[in-house]
Amino acid sequence: MIMNENYRVKPYQLLAHEALLRNLKQKYRQNDTILGNYKKFLAGYKGEINVDYKLSLYPHQDHIIIKDLRLKNFSKNFQIDTLLLTKYFLLIIETKNIKGELRYDSKQHQFIQIYNGVEKAYQDPILQADMQRQNLEYWLQTYNIKIPIETLIVSSNPQTIITNIYHDPDIYNKLIRAESLHIYLSKIKNTYKKIYLNQKRIDELHQLMLSKNEPYKPNLIDTYQLTDQYLIKGVPCTECYKPMTKVYRNWMCHYCTLSDTEAYKQKIFDYFLLGNDTITNKECRQLLQIDSPRIANYILNAMKLSHQGNNKGRVYLAPVLKEYPQDSMVPIKSHAIINN
């Protein structure tokens, strides 16, 4: 069987923070809380991409990989960074992209970062992964599926120093560096010989999990208690982030003279990312600061959004997660300083 390498897209948390930073007025854009959260989600995403790359080089082509899986047990959701499905076992991989020295205290279950002389405590990732395992076991039971589940915590930052304070042998097999991922995958693989699920059942489980996946979508306007006074009205320029004006078939920035025929698209994507599930022709006009219903209709149809209803009652629906642009720019000076 060929390894399934579904592409990891940016999570809603990261996309929504990018959308917010693009739409905040300049004087509010340097908010420490918003920037700190953005950098945290960006660091997490970059760490997962790094682990994805290492995983893609693993020579045994007998795994299905599911990325960013969020399932529900009753009213509670649980999130898994990466899940490997095999006939013999399932493997939960949780990624940590944290700088500096990481000290794990297996007696007190403390996970401590030391960076630039500052100590910071984090939730115990091994207990966290074990809770994910228990949640997944329970979820599988509801579908009468029984298969062993292993867990690995992977530190994705190559400059991070990991210290196992009490040299606990179990910790060495649970908290690892991305560079040694292949070694531990082989160890786990060699541990299991019994086939629990045949290929058909594995494929069915894969499709079931994808169908039950519920990505978390935040509403940052509510989270940060923002009002319209904080946000740019109209379409922000992609160069200087000042409001643009529609001139015939173009969007023009009178501050830096940039012109862009499709500048409106990111604004509409951002509207959805900032807590809106639908948009109407009237809402589109208000959003883009245009007067013509005909132009708004053309714009919404050109974006090929799913819709419900007809004529004046038509409502356009937000895209699914994988349909959002992955390479959109964010108006901050540097992405290099990531201190998770």
Image: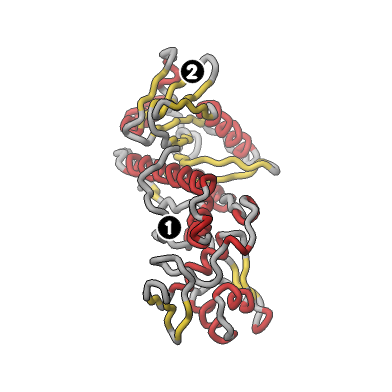
Q: Residue 249: give x, y in percent of width and height.
A: 43, 84
The outermost residue toward the top is: 166
Nearer-the-camera pick, 88 or 117: 117
> Mark 2 falls on what kind of element?
strand
Vertical placement of residue 140 versus 286, above or below: above
Q: Residue at 43% of width from left, 69% of height from top? A: 237
Q: Residue at 53% of width from left, 50% of height from top? A: 13
Which quadrant holds the C terminus?
top left
Circle 2/circle 1 CB separation < 8 Å: no
Report the residue marked by disc 2.
Answer: 105
Nearer-the-camera pick, 11 or 152: 11
Amino acid type of the residue tagged 2 in the rendering: Asp
Q: Is residue 308 left or right of residue 181?
A: right
Vertical placement of residue 159 versus 255, above or below: above
Give the quadrant of residue 259. bottom left
Amino acid type of the residue tagged 1 in the rendering: Val
Nearer-the-camera pick, 261 or 230: 230
Q: Residue at 55% of width from left, 47% of height from top? A: 209
